[in-house]
Amino acid sequence: MRSFLVLCAFLLCAAAFCWPLPLHMDTALDNDFDALMFASLLHSFAQNVVSSPMDLLDAPFYHPHGRTLRFVFHNYMVGLAFIPIYALTRSPVGAFNILHLLTLALDAFAMYLLVRHLTGEELPAVVSGVIFGFCPVRAANFQYTPFVTNYWVVFAILLLFKFQERLSGGGAPAFRLLASSLALYLAQCLSDMMGGLYLGLAFFPLLAAVLLANLRRLGAGGLAGAAAMLVVFAVCLAAATAPLRSVREEIGEGRAGWDAETVQEICPALSSYISTSPGNILYGRATAGFSLNARQVNFFGAAAWILAVIGFFAARKTARFLPAYMPPLALAICIAAFLLSLGPWICLTPGVKLCPGPSMLVYRFFPALRTFGGLGMAALIYVCIMAGFGVQWLAGRLLKAGLCRRGILGAALLAVLAMEYAAYPPTTWGEPFYLVPCEPPAVYRWLMRQGDRDPIIELPMPWEPEEVGGSLGEDAWAMYWAPYHGRRIVNGQTAFSFPEYKIIVDQMRLFPSHETIGILRALGVRYVVVHAGVLPRMEWQKALVRRHPEARYDWGATLERLDRSGDDLALRIKDGRDRLYEILPGAQLPRPRPPGSPLPRQGWALSSNANPSDAPLVIDGREETAWTTGRNQVSGLFFQVDLGRTYEINGVGMLLRSADECPKNPRLEVSADGQRWTALVYDGANLDFIQRVLANPREKLFRIAFPSTRARYVRMTLTRMDNLYPWSIAELSVYAFGS
C-alpha cells in the first residue's frame, strides 16, 4: 500500500510537471515535431498489432518502400505499452500523453525503490525519485517518451544489487536475479535502442564489478552460467536490431551516420550542465542562453549535485547495504558519462570548441551514434543514488531529535527541488503545444470516401535546410493523418531517410513541372495534397530564413503553376488553404538518354573551393577514396575540371560515396578559356538518378546528360543547401560521343 501511494504521488507530480497538458490530453502535443512524429509511429504500430500482426513493421510512409517501421521504429516496449492505452482511449494523442505521464511517474518510482532498498529509508528514496523523474533534463526532452523511458535499467540495477547482496550474505547464487536483471536491461534497449546502448554505461560496469567482486563465491560453474546468460542476451539484442541492420545494409552503411559537425550541434557543451529550458521558473532567464536545443540541456539541479557529493563521502557510514567498490565506481561512471556526453568535441558553450573529446574516438568507429547527450542519463542514475545517501546522512546526523525535524528536512528538500525543476511552459522552445484536430480535415475525409487506395504525396515537403523552410514539420503532419485515410504517402520524417527521398524533396520545389509530374507518375502517386497556408512559425525559423533566402519556398509561384497545369492535374477539393489534386493519366517521362563514352583523364587539372588538396582523388581510379566538401552542403561550393584541351562533350558522371551525398541542384557551366562561362540547360538528371536508386538502393552514379557543346573547362556549383550530408565524388567522368 505504501508503495502504491508513493506511485500515485509521483503521478500527481508528473501532472504538475507537464501542466497544462493534463487539461488537453486528447488535443495537444508538445510544440516539437518529434512528438507528432512519434505519436504517428506508435499509432501505426498499434494498428499493425490489430490488423496485420504478421508484419508489425509496416508503415504507410516513405512510399514506394515497404515495412518502413523497421528503419525508424525500434521502441518496441514503448509501442507495447501504448497499445492498451490506445485501445481504451481510441485517441493516438490522448494515449501518447497518458503514456508520457506514466513514464515520468515510473522513472521516479523505479529510483524510489532502488534507493529505498539501498538505504532502508523512505525520505532518501522519495527525494532521489523526484530528482530522477522530474529534473530539467526531462523538461528539455518533453514528450520525447523513448528518451525519458529509463525505469527498466533502474529496475535492472536494483536486481543486480539484490544479486550482490545474496552473494555477500553467503547464500547460494540466485541466478534468476541475474537473468531477470539482464532481461530488464534488454527491455530498456527495446524501449529506446540508442538510449539503451548509452545506458549500458550505467549497467555493465556495475555488472562487471559484481561478478569480479564475487569470483570465489561464484566459482567456475557460476561464471559459466553468467557467461551463458550474456550470450543469450547478446543474441536477443541482435535479433531485435536485425530489422534496423537489414535496412542499413539495403541502402548502404554510409547513410546511417551524420558528420561530426552535425553530431556536435545536438551534443551538450560544458555550459549545458548549468543550462535549463527557458521556461524554468528559477533559472530559465539566466541559463537558457547556454544551449541551442533541447539535447544541449543537461542540468540536474544544484541540490542534486550537492546531495550527491555529501552522499559520496557518507555512503559507507550510513548505507544499510553497499559494496565497498560502489562509491568509487559511481564517481568513475559519472566522470566517464559526463565526458562522453559532450560529443566529438569538448565545447565551453555550443560552438566554442576547446579540444577533441573522448567521444571522437567512439564516433569514428560508430558513425551512426548521434545523440551523445543521452550518456548524461547514465550519470544521473548514480547522482540520484549518491544523493539518496546524502539525504540519509543529513537526516541521521543533523536531525537526531526526531520524526518532526526529519519531516521538516524532507519538506525543505522537496520544496527546493520543486523550485529548481518547475517550468512553465514545460516545453523547451516556442509555444507550449500544438492543438491537434479531433477529426481529419476535409481533404482526408474526401480521400477516405474514395474506393481506391492509390498513394499520395503532400506538399510542401521539408525543403533544405529542414529548419528554415516554410514547411517545417509538414511531413510529420502527413504521417499523423496517414493511418486515418489508409493510403501510403511519399512523405516521411524520421531520423534517417531513404536515399532517393531527399532528391524527391528537392524536385518537388518545382511542382507542378512536367518533370515532377513524371516523377510522381513513376512512383504510382495519384493524389497531391497541397497545404497553401504554411509559414515559418517561430522567430528562430524566420531568422534562419533571412540568413538563407535560398531555402524559402515561393508558394505564390507554385499556385500560379498549379492554375496553369493543364491536362496533368485536376482540382478535386479545396478546403480553406488546403487543396487536393488528382494526377490525370498521361505518358510517363522517357528515361533520359545516357551520355557518350568517358574521356581519358590523363592531364586533367582539378580545383575546388572546398578541400582542394583532395581533388585529385576523383581520378585516382579507386572508389574507396573520395573528394568531399568536408561539411554539409551550402550554396556556392564548386568543383572544376580542366580537360587539358577542348572536346565536344555531352555529359558528366560522378560516382558518389552514397546516394545521400549527391549534389543539390547543381549549376553546370562550361568554358573554352576558363574566363567566360556558359550555363548548360539539362533535363532528366534527377529523374534518371531517382529511377536508378529505386531499382537499386546502392546506386551511386549520378549522371547529367546535355546537348553536345565544345568546352575545355567544366564547373559544377551547388545552388542549394543540405544540412545533413556533404557532397562527395569518388570518381569523376566527362563524356563525349565518339571519343
Image (cartoon, grey):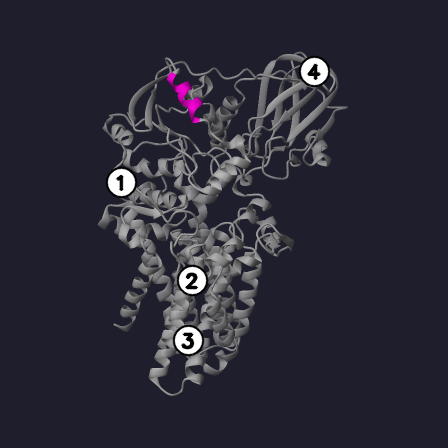
Q: Which residue has dot 1 on it?
A: 51
Question: Where is residue 641, by image quadrant?
Answer: top right
In the rendered image, the vertical position of residue 152 relative to residue 660, given as above or below: below
Q: Main secondary structure of the magenta part?
A: helix
Q: Residue at x 29, y 25 (%)?
A: 574
Q: Nearer the viewer, residue 32 or 412?
A: 412
Q: Marks 3/1: CA distance? A: 46 Å
Q: Marks 2/3: CA distance? A: 21 Å
Residues under numbered marks 2 and 3 in contact, where contact means CB atoms less than 8 Å apart: no
Closer to the observer: label 2 or label 3?
Answer: 2
Q: Position of residue 461 (x, y in %)?
A: 43, 32
In the rendered image, the vertical position of residue 364 relative to residue 666, given as above or below: below
Three-letter amino acid code of the residue under disc 2: Cys
Q: Is any part of residue 384 visible from this angle?
A: yes
Q: Nearer the viewer, residue 648 or 394?
A: 394
Region in magenta? 555-563
